[in-house]
Amino acid sequence: MKKFLIIISSLFVLYGCNHDKEKDSEETSSLSENIDRKPPEQVNKEPKNGQNPENPAEIDFMHYFKPAESIATFIGDGNEFASFTEKTTYLSSNYVATIIDNGGAVTMKVYRVDENEILLVMDKLVEGMPEDADYPKIEDLDKLPVLDTFLAGPIEVGTTFKNWSIIETDSELVTPYQTFDDVFIIEETGDGFKNRKYIVEDYGVVKTEAIMSENSSEQFIVTSTLEDISLH
């Protein structure tokens, strides 16, 4: 259990801040359609349905994040760090930053979006309030090495990257925010533990799940599930 708590801490530390809010169902269903996902100079070039207009079979991985300048609230279960808020900011046509806040600590993650993968290039603590965070310059981000692979294609069962594999596609997931169709699940397994991320086009990760098996009859499960998205 001690080993697993270390794993859980690495997954959920800095995450937090549960927020209850009544949602209008009509606004919910049209959220991704009513906001520009990229900087203004990129809006007219925006592919639809995650596809490159020059090659419909090619996926635009910029579509696996939440809307620009949105704040998502995740409700957690099983661990105090499993509840958190996540602000998404589009820094350029191929860099996306998220600010994750648990009410006591704040972290910034920056992702570089390449042709067929999303790469984590920055993961650091942020001093002060989330809204006061200073984002790095693009020329500095271009020089950073890759820390991890967040997602890679093709989006189909059997695709593997780092320690993760796509294990399921076209799934349905019920969340407090809404019911999602066409969810795909990526999974990481290790000695006595299993981590999963549930991902939806135009929303990114909508649920995370960490499962630890103490023995064949007992499991310890920690989840974070999307509860709300607000636009700022």
Image (cartoon, rainbow, N blue to C red):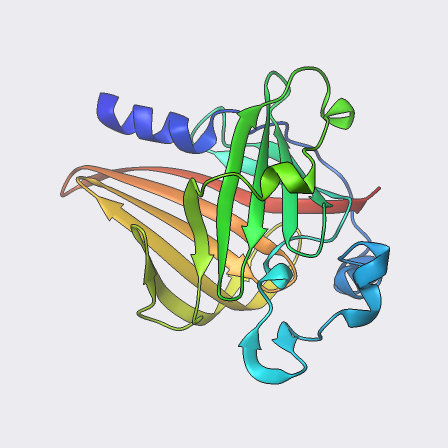
Residue closest to the eye, 52 or 211:
52
Residue closest to the eye, 19 or 182:
182
Residue at the (46%, 65%) spot, across then down:
184
Whether 165 is drawn above or below 148: the answer is below
Residue 73: x, y in percent? 66, 39
Residue 114: x, y in percent? 54, 60
Is residue 1 in view from this perspective? no
115 sits to left or right of 132: left
Residue 32 figure quarter: bottom right
Whether 103 is drawn above or below 206: the answer is above
Q: Look at the image and tell me in which quarter the C terminus lies.
A: top right
Residue 46 figure quarter: bottom right
Residue 138: x, y in percent? 67, 42
How many numbered marks have been drawn onto this rendered protein structure?
0
**Which residue is outermost to the left?**
216
Residue at the (38%, 67%) spot, across then down:
168
Q: Look at the image and tell me in which quarter the N terminus lies.
A: top left
Is residue 216 in view from this perspective? yes
